[in-house]
Amino acid sequence: MQIPEPRDPVEALKAALPDALLDVHQFRDELTLIVKPEQVTEVARFLRDTPGLIYNYLSDISSVDYYPDYYSRPGRFGVCYHLYSMLYSRRIRLKVYLPEDNPRVPTMTTVWPAANWLEREILDMMGIVFDGHPDPRRILMPEDWDGHPARRDAPLGYETVMFSFNVDEIKQHKPRPRE
Amino acid sequence: MAITEQKFKWEGDLEALRGLVSDRAMTGETMLLNMGPHHPSTHGVLRLLLELDGEEIVTCMPDVGFLHTGIEKNIESKTYEKAVPLTDRMDYLAPMSNNLVFSMAVEKLVGLDVPERAQIIRVICMELTRINSHLVWLGTHALDMGAMSVFLYCFREREYVLNMYEMLGGQRMMSSYIRPGGVWRDVPPEFIPAVEHFVDYFPPKIDDYEALLTNNPLWIDRTQGIGVIEPDDALAYGVSGPSLRGSGVNWDIRKAQPYSGYENYDFDVPLGEHGDVYDRFYVRILEMRESIKIIRQAVERLKKTKGPFRSQNRKFVPPPRSELGHSMEAVIHHFKLWTEGFSAPDEEVYVAIESPRGEIGCYLHGTGGNKPRRVHFKTPSFMHISALPIITKGHMIADLIGIIGSIDIVLGDCDR
């Protein structure tokens, strides 16, 4: 069987889905495509199925919280999809930025079932909601846990001492008991 | 009420499970059974909620998180160098793999070089770790299936590997030997003779394990045709490592994207054919032989390669103790690195290596300061447990024990 020549993912994506791609970032030898959150599954399916790209393996989904100085970025949260192409032995990262209020992104489980638990972990740890996820429950933390521990404003096993200069900030991010 | 009249039905939170188990469980036609979290064959604290039709598994719902210790969150509050001992505690049967993937991520983030000698030591460590982990896997897997003696032999040889760990890092399990920029210290003089003895001593022992299991009709009956993972399913569910290669998919990161100089070693990647428990067992047996092959070559290279065992870039790697007495520069570097640590750019990297269980990946995001913004480990056990419902569907409950053993999970690795 003839293996098609590898194609440049950026060029291919610009030709096929010009609206989806917001930015391209290169650091060391890693390519990051910053895409629109609504179109991330579409982009992933394109990268998976197009001859010459075939990013057929979902390595990881990880999340990052840019709190407190996220004003220079498009959003507070980032979700990174690490894809791997076994045919061409190369990796690519899809990244979406999500706002602080109500961070939501479509689920990747329709493209790779492997995303199921990875997304549950992010829902649990970071509080990002995946629309259309088949089983949106907490996975690592107890079911009745309040808050999302991987967020940067979640305290690390202790609480910040409340003073008059930081009382507003602490109250804003303090996990509240459930009604 | 007589015992026979009791309803064997879980009344409590049954409603909460609607949609997750089949409707037959709602009427009590099938049985819901808890397996674990304290079950000897779950290799840690894994709880499985099983829906059983007789002895047949209808649904298997893994429940993890009992061993969650917040390692990723803890690393965010530590400097890069001080975070290394935490990574040992994830996959406690393959501590060096975790050290290496974290160190490689840090090295990539800050652009740090690793000298040749350190790379060779790392390869030896990785392969010893693979043997260590596979020995525990083989022993416990066989023990689950009722072969007691294999367990004792495997742990006898594992002791040998642990002694070599102790020579390197001073610790038998949580070695923290591999650090960003190289390794903690050079190998001690008694290490190379010990490894050379081990590579001659160990292959006949693998023959012994094989004599006990490979052609054993009881073993074959219990493992062949059980727990088949189709290659497409395996890729879709993120299965990696020997479990993926048992299904015949030729993907080994050591070959596909070589790191630490693996491209210089001559070794084969064993592949299975049917993707069942037996093939995964046999792939790991062959992997141990390949590891011995790599260690033999690496020891020869190590003897020929002189030079530093960690990077000489003093902005990232502390100076040797001997320099502290006469160099003011060294004292400054030592003080800065052990108090403040080094800074890394506000960028993100993802590094993946081949751990004994599969692809272990480290996503590291710096802040521009001395602590990471976010660390996330993609761990093979997590992905393998998430694939368990697909693998176990329609199997007998007794086979579940074998299947859990064959995908080689460590719950510390899964829950982190």
Image (cartoon, grey):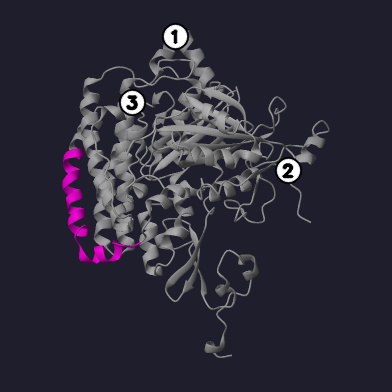
Disc 1 element = loop
Determine crowd level at label 1: few under 14, some 14-19, many 20+ residues with C-alpha closer than 10 A.
few
Query: Mark on residue A102?
Result: 2
Query: Which of the two residues, B48 or B204, is positioned nearer the viewer here?
Result: B48
Task: Name which residue type carries label 3.
Answer: Gln
Q: How many marks?
A: 3
The answer to whether the residue labelled 3 contacts the one labelled 2, judged by CB atoms less than 8 Å apart, is no
Query: Which of the two residues, A97 or B202, is positioned nearer the viewer here?
Result: A97
What residue is at 75 percent from the left and 43 percent from the top?
A174
Residue receiving disc 1: B327
What residue is at 21 percent from the left and 65 percent from the top?
B217
Disc 2 element = loop
In the displayed structure, does residue B190 sit left or right of residue B35?
left
Q: Nearer the viewer, mark 3 or mark 1?
A: 3
What x and y, as percent, mark residue B88? 44, 39
Query: Which of the two residues, A86 or B142, is positioned nearer the viewer here?
Result: A86
Q: Main secondary structure of the magenta part?
A: helix
Q: Quadrant of the C terminus of chain A?
A: bottom right
What x and y, as percent, mark residue B127? 30, 37
Determine crowd level at label 3: few under 14, some 14-19, many 20+ residues with C-alpha closer than 10 A.
many
Residue receiving disc 3: B119
Q: Which residues are magenta?
A: B198-226
Q: Nearer the viewer, mark 3 or mark 2?
A: 2
User: Label 2 marks which chain's residue?
Assistant: A
Which residue of the protein is positioned furthest toward the right in this rendering?
A164
